Image: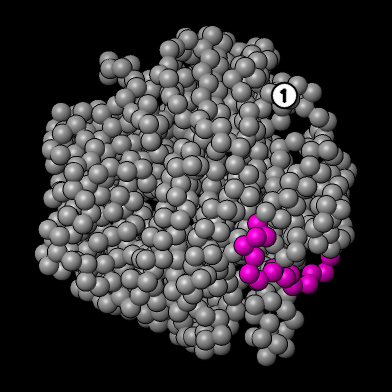
Amino acid sequence: MTTRADAHAPRGLLAGGVLARGDAESLVKRILGFSHADACRVSLGSRSRGNTRFAVNQVSTAGDTEDLSVVVRAVVGKKVGTATTNRLDDDALRRVVETAERIAKLQPDDPELMPELAPQSYLDVEAWDDATAAADPAARAALVAAVTERARRQGLVSTGYVEVESQATAIGNSAGLFAYHRATDVAMTTTVRTSDGAGSGWAGGAARRIAGLDADALGERAIDKARRSARAVAIEPGRYTVVLEPTAVGNLVQLMAFATGARNADEGRSFFSKPGGGTKIGMKVVDERVTLTSDPQHAEAPGSPFDGDGQPTRKVTWIGEGVVRDLAYDRYWASRKNVAPVVQPRCLQMQGGTQSLDEMIASTERGILVTRFWYIRPVDQRTILYTGLTRDGTFLIEKGKVTRAVKNLRFNESPVFLLNNLEALGRAARVSASESGSTGVPVVVPAVKARDFNFTSLSDAV
Amino acid sequence: MGDPAIRALVQQAVDAAKSGGASYADARISQNRVRTLSTRERRVQGVVDSETMGCGVRVLVDGTWGFAATRELTGDAVARCARQAVAQAKANRRTQVVPVRLAPVTPVANGAWRSPARIDPFDVAIEDQVALLLAANAAALGVKGVPFVTSAMFFLREEKTFASSDGSLTVQTIYRSQPSMTCTAVDVAAGDFQSRQSTDVQPMGKGYEHVLDAKLVEHAPRWADEALQKLKAKPVEPGRYDLVLHPTHLWLTIHESIAHPTELDRALGYEANYAGTSFVSPPEKVLGTLRYGPATMNVRADRDQPGSLGAVGWDDEGVAPEPYDIIKDGVVVDYQTTREQAPALDWWYRTRGQDVRSHGNSYAQSWADVQFQRMPNVSLLPGAKDLGWDDLIAATDRGIAIVGDGSFSIDQQRYNAQFGGQLYHEIKGGKIVGLLKDVAYQMRTPEFWGAMDMLGGAKSYQLGGAFSDGKGQPAQSNAVSHGCPPTRHRQIAVINTGRKA
């Protein structure tokens, strides 16, 4: 190991400590210069993450971390090897290139090898915010205090998490391609509990700019739900009409987008497989009000302009008016099927409607209002069926009004069935859709009202 | 012991934190080497060698934590990182209500520990590793009707150097290994497909010998055949069944329904926003009184079972872990703790004549993450009678015997859970009469363990585990093993998860 300074460590780090474009390009070139392989690809991941956790109304732990990873993919003949490092001195960089080449030489030929891409043109994606990249621990602590002080004053117990991330990714290869993208992301979530543990309320949000987070509003919402969720009553599990807040919709609908691999569909082992062979492209699978896209240039939920091999991303419509319009094809499978490659979702938007949450509730005779879902795990890939539970704000709707808190419920349900049983759509909003509260894939979804949602058991958990 | 330059750096980081105003500081430098190999059918999908290295510094300033981490390993960089952590702690202090205090620790000035790995996976020729996976795939593909097979190997070697302002300095070399396969059978006409994962082989804190012992090539045709059998299996009739659970399945139920709810940070509310709280709470109302299961139920925590994923010499705050009971004769008697948490149970330890010490359950997944309470190995001890898997089945009139871990989900207080598996054998009259599919059981934790009426003996005890136990924000992965014998649980609710798209 070495403890020398990185002799050629990049000097011009951006605010937040991630690589600027020029530095990324020269670092990629330096690494490519060490290559003796027939083809070589270098990917850089430069990341700075600040996080602050709070629990029992005070900061518990926090972290500020900077890292820069280098991934080298070497191709020798038709053989491929990959090596990664986060050391940037010349010895380490030479070694990582040699390791990738050595691994490649030990492989059998790859029958699915695709040539490195020549230079590509990419969409302009605006995903960076200087103020977010510059946010320091004090800025995060201020967001936290907006919740903890409110909760403490009211005799409640707040817990939560703030994450601010800046990252730059760059890809260059021996065919002359170079791609660079930088993005900032923030997410804040809070769970407020009553001091006796009888009530629990959650609120969360995500944005690409720290100014886009309203900690006061999040705190108010979680506090309100904590109070209203106390003394929940048991109801019989079964099929219910549900009004899902946008976060709950994001929790489920993103699972459908992640199941769009064309190869699995063609191989007969996906929901998107057509019985008898082929895929469901062109088939109506959900309600015609459903349109699901990945638009890298979306203002609130942008995605990377390129994939891991430098393939450009474009706006993709996965589901258009209820019909499967496209699936994700990697370059090899696209070449086999004579279609253009389609990059897997790196952001997700579901088209909304015009109803407010209150209107959806008002039109519901008997139903359940869900704040979010938790511990969502696959049960049956054939139907994209998942299980999981409601959490931190589950309420009974009777005769058009939210009447009382109900105990949490386990579901066994699929976004496919949910979107088939659609009753109404709310306005789309950016949500914090990852269970862990990290920034993750940006998701914009509406609130949804749907019938016959399948709850299979009751939970005593608050 | 260890690299002198690294030892000097962790010490420099601790010194810089102390002179910057920290009352306590620790520093960890880890060098992680990871190799992953993945294949499908007759093709290598990827072989990746990764290394990552850096330094994380944790400080306590006036009772508030700070943490910063850097990939730059120079004296200046780690000192800057230490000062950054101190500054962050000062920014965090504005919200302080109760200052952190730490249980005492016995410092180890020159500790060294190494996983019991016989063969370093990174010394094994990559072409041999690739050849083994492709041979296993070929063996599985020999089963007609099984067109798809994936296989993989994962290896970790972590060199971790730790220093604290209490005077500890330890160097540890930790290995983890997992070979795995998935065989998939497809009925295109029926639009059905079923997979069998190689859960007979669990991840371990061992070296390449674990891969050789796994005998993938020998087992692959059976796994492939079982995938095919699952296509033809009978859909389960929902209802209540006696469940006989194999250790390759039960470890995950133990993980979710015993190990997680007995984490003290959860019980005290620290994980309420993500992992959740616990029904085993509050401590003053449950310790010594909450009945978890029958008197035959004993659950023990340790970080020293040979080859287990949780085994270490010292945890990530320099505490030497010792085994301890979590459930004794069916009753909860302790929680998992760190130095920060143990003082919360001082009243309990005093009544038992025990010192107020951390159980050594602090862990961080890498140099870039702050350490916090993570579970050690948490194991269900075998019963006194010399019973095995076949004995439990023979004693069961109408039931389902479940092999391998599958789908899993549990609520945020660990009451309501649902588990699937790999194979569901229908039991009638003490005999396995066929295979079922679309099975999941739903349970309420206290009733599930209360319904345990048989457990296997010492000879039937084995370790299962996972690399990917998630907790914390940002979420960190912990690697942990759970040992257990097979068990039987009476009259558990089983649902049918199959639906038509």
Image position, residue B77 (x, y; %): 79, 38
* Residue A294 image-quadrant placement: top left
Image position, residue B357 (x, y; %): 73, 75
Looking at the rendered structure, the number of numbered marks drawn on it comes to: 1
Q: Nearer the viewer, residue A235 or B397?
A: A235
Q: Amino acid at mark 1?
A: Arg
- The magenta stretch spans which residues? B92-107
Question: Left or right of B447: which side holds A426?
Answer: left
Q: Chain of mark 1?
A: A
Q: Is residue A120 magenta?
A: no
Q: Residue at point 26% right, 67% down?
A: A395
Q: Is residue B101 magenta?
A: yes
Q: Residue at point 55% right, 68% down?
A: A56
Q: Nearer the viewer, residue B375 or A249?
A: A249
Image position, residue B475 (x, y; %): 53, 52
Q: Residue at point 22% right, 63% down?
A: A368
**Mark 1 sits on what residue?**
A11
